[in-house]
Image: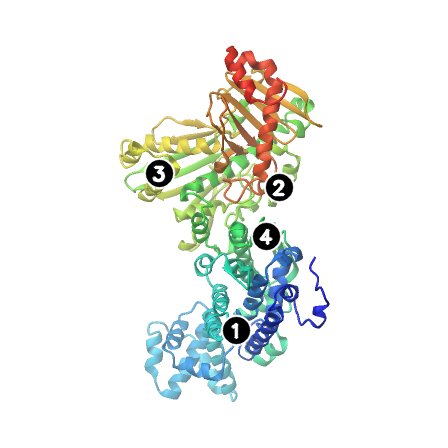
Amino acid sequence: MMRDGEGFLNASQADTYIEKCFEIKCQEFKIGNHLINEWREDKKYYCSFTDTTVFDFQHYSMHDRSHSVNILHNIKMILGKERVEMLSVSDLWLLLESAYCHDIGMAITYEELCDIWEQSEFKEFVKKSMNSKSEDTRKIAYIYTKLDEIVRNRSEFVRAANADEPNEFIKEFDNLLDQECWAVIAQRYIMLLYTEFIRSRHTERSGGFIRGYGRKKDRSRMYEIVAQISILHGEEFEKVYSMVKQEDNGFSCDHMHPQFAAVMIRLGDLLDMDSNRFNTRMLNHMGMIPVESQLHIQKHKAMTHLSYTEEGISAVAKSEDFQVCKTVNQWFSWIEEETVHLICSWNLIVPKELYGCRMNKCDLKIYYKDELFDANKQTNFQADPVGIFEMLIGNNIYKTRLEFIREYLQNALDASKMKLWLWLKEQKSLLKMYPPEDITPFDINSDVYEQNRIEMEFKINWEKQEILFSIQDHGIGMEEKCISTLSVVAGNHWKSRKEYADEIEKMPVWLRPTGGFGIGIQSAFMLTDAVVFITKSEKEPRGKKIVIESKKKGGKVSEYSDSDAKNGTRVEVYINLGLFLRELQEKKKFFGLDERIERNIYDCQELPKVLLDIMERYISEMAIYSLIPVYLECDNEAERRVGMGWLPTPSVNLEKVGRNVVNSVKIGNESWNIKSFVYDDTMVLWDNKDYIMSILTLDGDINQSKCYYKGIIIRDEAIETNEPFSIETIYYGDNVTHYLSVSRDCFIGDMRNKHRKNLYILKILYASLFINYFNEFTDCENRQKEIKKCLPGTI
C-alpha cells in the first residue's frame, strides 16, 4: 500500500486516485515538487480550454474536466488500486496528461473559427455533407449553402455540390425564412455544421495543440508522446503499434509505456457512459438537438447497470426505443472490440509488473421493451475482424491466415463433445459403475467416438479457380439464440448458451468444451468475403442456413430455412485458389513443404493428393490426440483419418487391451488413482486427479516430449530429452485461460514449470506400473535397464 510518508499530501489537489499516486510517487524524486507543480500548471492550462468546449458543443456529452476525471476513474477500476500503485511516475504522468488533453482539439477560438471558413478543406466538407447518410447533416449543409447563395448570390455553389439529387429540404428552407427568428435558427445550423467539421478532426487538432505546447517545455520528447496518444484515441487500434513504442525513457531512471497508456485512454474514454454525461442547461440553451445527439442522450439514460473491475466489464441498458438500442449496441460493440484487443495484446504492451491479464470478455446486455435485444438480426457487423486478425498475425499470435481451420475445428470438437455427453447421460449401466466426475476417456468405447466423427473436405473448382473448404460435425447444432451471436468478434463462450450452461457444470471436466479465446468464425474473413453455416439443433424441428458477409462486403447476416439440414453444423468457406496456394507457399516452413511438394501444389493432377498430404500433416500435428476423430477428403482422393492417437486401431474395445486400475500410487504425501492400458510398445495412463492423459512410447519421437490441451498441440512447449522413450502429455483441465496464452501455442504464467513437475511425477507413476508390464514392452534385459535408468522411483 502506498503512503504519503511525511504528510506531504495534506494539501493535495488530486481529483483521482491516479493523480494522488502520481503526487505520492513524486516524493521519491529529487525534482518531485517541481514535477507536481508543473503537472498542476498543465492541468489548469488544459482545463481552461476543455471547459470552453460546451460553448460550441452544447449538443454533445461533456468534454470538460469531468470527462478527464471519469476516464481516470475508469482506468483505475479496470487496473485495480494495486496495479495502479505499481505504475511508474512516468506512466502515471502519461495517463494524466493524455486524459486531460486528448479532447482539447474540440476547443476553438474566434480566430480559428474564422480561419476554418477560409479553408478549402472545410468547403469540400460542406459539399460532401450534402450527400451524407445522416438526414440532419444533409439538411444542415443544404440550408447553409442556400443561405450562402442568398448572401453571395452564388447559385453555382449549390448546383455543383449535388447537381443530380433533388433538394429535399427546399420546403424546410422556405419555412425558415418565413420565421421572424430565422437568424437564431440559422446560427444554430451554422454551429452544427462547423462543430461536425471540428469533431471529425479533433484528434489531429489535439495532437497539434500538445505538440506546439510541448515545444516550449524541457521534456518536449515526452509531450510528443502525449500528442501521439491524443491522436490515437480516434484511430484504428492497429496504429497503436506503429505510432508509439511499447517502452520509452521517462523521468530520471524510470520508464513509461506509451502503448499501454494509449490503450487505457481509448477504453477509459469509451466507458464514460453513465447517465449524467450531458449538461441539461446547455441542451435547453441549444434548443435544436440533432437526431444523432438525441439518440446518444437516450443511450446514456438507458444505462441501468455499469460495473468495471479487473476481471471484466459489465453493463445493462434498457430502452423502449429501437433506434436507441441500436445506438447502444454500436457503442457496446466498440467496447467489446477494444476489450478483445486489450486481452490479446496485454503482455505485449503493459509494464512487466502488470503481466498476467485478469480481464475476461465483456458482459454487455441490451433490453428492448424488456426483451433481450437481438442486434445481429437487425444490424450489420460493426467490428473489423480483418484488422484484429492482421494484428494477431503481426504479433505472431497466429502463424498463418489458414489458422481459421483450427478455429472451426475447435468449434466442431466442442459441439461433438456436448453431443457425446448427452449420449453418456443415457448410459445407465455405465453411470452405475462410475459417477460422472469419475468417468474417464477409457470408459467409453472407441465406436462411440467414431459415431461423432468430424468430416473436413476440400473441393477444387478449376473453372472458377476457387477451393471450397467445409467442415461437418454431428454435434448439437446451433439453436436460434446461438445463431444470433455468430457475428460476435471474440469466440462466443459456451456458458452464454443457457440451454447448455447447466450441462457443462455436470460434465466430466475432461469432456467440457474448450471455448476461451479466439476470434471465432470471423477469422475466415482474412481469406474470404462470406461464410455459410448449415445447421440443425436437436432442440428445433427445422434446420437453418446462415450466410455471413465480411464487413468489407457490408457485414450482412442472412438467415434461411433449410429442411434438408442434418443434425449438427456444416460450415462452408469459398476461397480464391491462388490466394489459398499462395498462403501455403508463403508459410511453407510452417506447413512442412519440401521442394517436391512446393513444386506440385501448382500441378492440376497432383494438387488433390498434395493438398490432402499437407492438411493431414497439419491436422495430425495439431489434433492427433483429439478424442473425436477427424476425417479428411479432397476431391477423389481416399479419405484420411486423424485423431484418437492414444488408441491402437480406429476401432478397439478398451476392455480387451489390458485396462486396469492402480490405486493409491504414492509420491510423498500425495496419492493418485490411475487408469491405464498397454498395447504394443505404448502405455497410456490417465490421472483423474489433474485430468491428464499421458502416453509413453518406446522408440517414438525420441528426444522430444510434446504436450497438448484437450487433444490440440501446444506447439511451443515441446521439451528436448535424451531418453529411450517419448512421453506425450494431454491436459484436459477445465479452463483454457489457466493453461494457455491467447495463441494456444504456449503456456501462460507458471504453467511451464508445473508441466515439468508433472512430467517428473508421470515418470514416477510409469515406474510403478512398469513392474507389471516390462515383459509386454521388451524382453531385452539391456533395454529394460536403459528404460529403468531414466525412470525415477523404486523400480
Disc ID at residue 690: none
The amino acid on which the numbered mark 3 sits, given as a three-letter code, is Lys
Spatial distance from mark 2 to mark 1, Cα to Cα?
49 Å
- Farthest residue in the front direction? 30
Q: Is residue 775 above or below residue 444?
A: above
Q: Earlier in the sequence, mark 1 or mark 4?
A: 1
Mark closer to the chain start, 4 or 2:
4
At a point 31% along the width and 43% down the height, the residue shown is 578
The circle drawn on residue 499 is 2
Which quadrant would residue 351 be assigned to in this image? bottom right
Element carrying mark 1: helix
x then y, percent, for residue 347: 53, 50
Q: Which label's residue is closer to the chain start, 3 or 1?
A: 1
| N-term-proximal mark, 2 vs 1 | 1
Q: Secondary structure at mark 2?
A: helix
Amino acid type at image mark 4: Glu
Quote the CA–CA distance across marks 2 and 3: 43 Å
Pick the front one: 638 or 709: 709
Q: Which residue is mark 3?
A: 588
> Badges 4 and 2: C-beta atoms under 8 Å apart?
no
Q: Position of residue 610 (x, y in %)?
A: 33, 32
